Image (spheres, grey):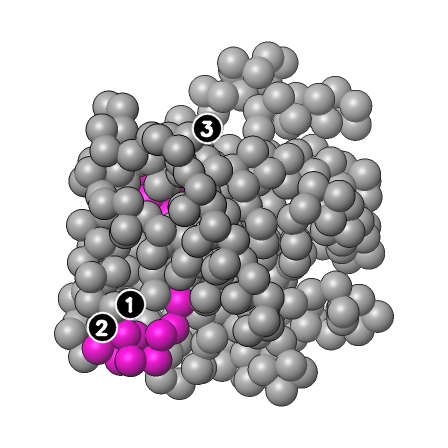
Amino acid sequence: MLSKTIDPKFIYGLPKAELHVHLEGTLEPELKLALAQKNHIDIGQTTVEDIRKTYEFNSSLSAFLAVYYSGMIVLQTEDDFYQLAMEYLKRAKENNVRHVEMFFDPQAHLARGISFDTVINGYYQACQDAKALNIDAQLIMCFLRDMPAQSANEILLMPQHHRNKILGIGLDSDEHHNPPLKFAYQFANATAQGYHTTMHADIDQIDSIEHIKQALEIINVNRLDHGTNIVENQDLVKWAAHTQIGLTACPLSNKFIANDSKGKEILDLLDQGVKVSINSDDPAYFGGYISDNYLALDSEFEISKEDIIKLAKNSFETSWISPIQKQIYLNEIDTYVNNYEE
Ligand code: ADE
Ligand code: ZN
């Protein structure tokens, strides 16, 4: 269904921050095939169409993660990581993303024999080159929650001579049986080292509310990824509205993984003053980039222009940039809205 209320051009051009995108989740079938051929890797498919078919998994986080991790095999050299990130950043430019904080999963690459330097140097060069696209790009290093906590310790020690290349620490992968508290020590350590922190609270997980409480009340994360299950607990909603903590929602990802965009919950939280933002998660796998996520919400709920602007403002307000820089981006939104001609 096409957006009935808002001109898609308005959404594409609206200045935004993207706070929840996994670089490894931006691997489009075309790039996967090109890298497989360049690196002489047999991925089991020889056409873009056949690769695209493997991206059509049934609705579950674990089914998605199986395709996501196996796809990484094509990423071998520093230049492969650079190319992956640059292709995402070019798409971000088309969506007028002005600031992006991008997740990456070093453990998944180390486990395949790829060095930390190879990964970080490729991604960081893309962040540097994003400046030419007028995008401020930063990196969030994630721990894989289905790996032992000891492995996360090792990862935290890795970037010593890359410290200035990493803005924050996140937690992703399979949440089932992997609660936030498993990584309490590593997150305390990350905070002590001056990293910003966030973690996934994936949609409709077993023990969702208990996990969210651990993340917010014990680990004290600075942001929460997904996290919209807080609507089930009015105390948490009040707390989130009071503290203005950011929740990074991803409607298209929710549709794939939970069979529901959770747009009702997202808009309900927005109405209650919670700082929720709209993001793309794994855009190559979930059928769209950041503007497509705004448009998906609009086509389902016909949201007001004011709410769309509020969601975009929330993205900057809950980003990890200086107050002055936030104000510059917020002013950019106002200028865009005031000068937009229908
Ligand atoms: N890793 C990449 N995408 C993810 C998601 N949506 N949830 C948890 N871990 C992920
Ligand atoms: Zn995610």
Residue 253 colored in magenta in the image: yes
Residue 223 percent across, percent down from the top left: 44, 70
Q: Is mark 3 within 8 Å of ligand 1?
A: no
The majority secondary structure of the magenta stretch comes to: helix
Residue 199 seen in this snapshot: no
Specify the amino acid type for callout 2: Val
Q: Nearer the viewer, mark 2 or mark 1?
A: 1
Specify the amino acid type for callout 1: Val
Task: Name the element at disc 1.
Answer: loop
Residue 136 colored in magenta in the image: no
Q: Nearer the viewer, residue 202 or 272?
A: 272
Number of residue marks = 3
Compared across the picture, whether 325 is left or right of 337 comes to right
Q: Which residues are magenta?
A: 238-255
Residue 118 percent across, percent down from the top left: 81, 50
Name the residue rendered at 41%, 47% in the picture.
338
The residue beneath circle 3 is: 55
Label disc, if present, on residue 274 of the rendered structure: 1
Q: Are marks 2 and 1 in contact (CB under 8 Å)?
A: yes
Dividing the picture into quadrants, the one containing residue 251 is top left
Disc 3/disc 2 C-alpha distance (Å)? 34 Å
Dividing the picture into quadrants, the one containing residue 73 is top right
Residue 269 seen in this snapshot: yes
Residue 215 percent across, percent down from the top left: 39, 76
Residue 11 percent across, percent down from the top left: 40, 38
Task: Name the element at disc 2.
Answer: helix
Q: Nearer the viewer, mark 3 or mark 1?
A: 1
Name the residue rendered at 48%, 50% in the picture.
335
The residue beneath circle 2 is: 237
